[in-house]
Amino acid sequence: MYILIAGGGKVGANLASTLLKVGHEVTLLDNDRHRYSILEEQFEHIARYGDATELYVLERPRSSAPTWWSRSPAMTRTT
């Protein structure tokens, strides 16, 4: 399952770690630059910098994201 976690604090980082161990695909978002750099060291390519309340951040699919992720009607910008 592909899972997006908004926030890389203690709960988000532990959740990401647990989900990765059982084989899920995870993206971890955090909007604090310092915290992001720590997450990037710990989780490497699954950590992303950005604010999960901003639609444009959620619209940027990772290369490993399922194809439906970027095509979902809920994720499509209507401007």
Image: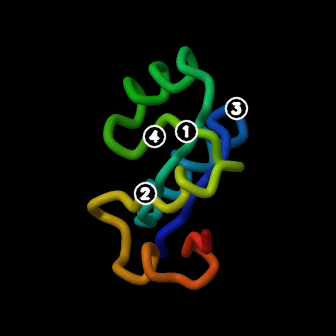
Q: Is residue 58 left or right of residue 52?
A: left
For image coordinates 27% across by 61% down, the residue present is 63
Name the residue tied to disc 1. 50
Residue 73, quarter of the rendered image: bottom right
Q: Is residue 38 above or below residue 43?
A: above
How far is disc 2 from disc 3 in space, using C-alphas?
24 Å
Name the residue tied to disc 4. 48
- Residue 35: x, y in percent? 57, 21
**Mark 2 vs 4, N-terminal side:** 4
- Tag 2–tag 3 contact (CB < 8 Å): no
How far is disc 2 from disc 4 in space, using C-alphas?
10 Å
Q: Amino acid at mark 3?
A: Lys
- Tag 2–tag 4 contact (CB < 8 Å): yes
Near mark 1 (Cα within 10 A), the count class, few <14, some 14-19 or many ≥20, is: some
In the image, 43 versus 34, the foreground residue is 34
Name the residue tied to disc 3. 10
How far is disc 3 from disc 4 in space, using C-alphas?
16 Å
**Mark 2 vs 1, N-terminal side:** 1
Residue 60 is tagged as 2
- Residue 65: x, y in percent? 36, 67
- Residue 52: x, y in percent? 65, 48
For image coordinates 55% across by 52% down, the residue present is 18
**Mark 3 vs 4, N-terminal side:** 3
Q: Amino acid at mark 2?
A: Arg
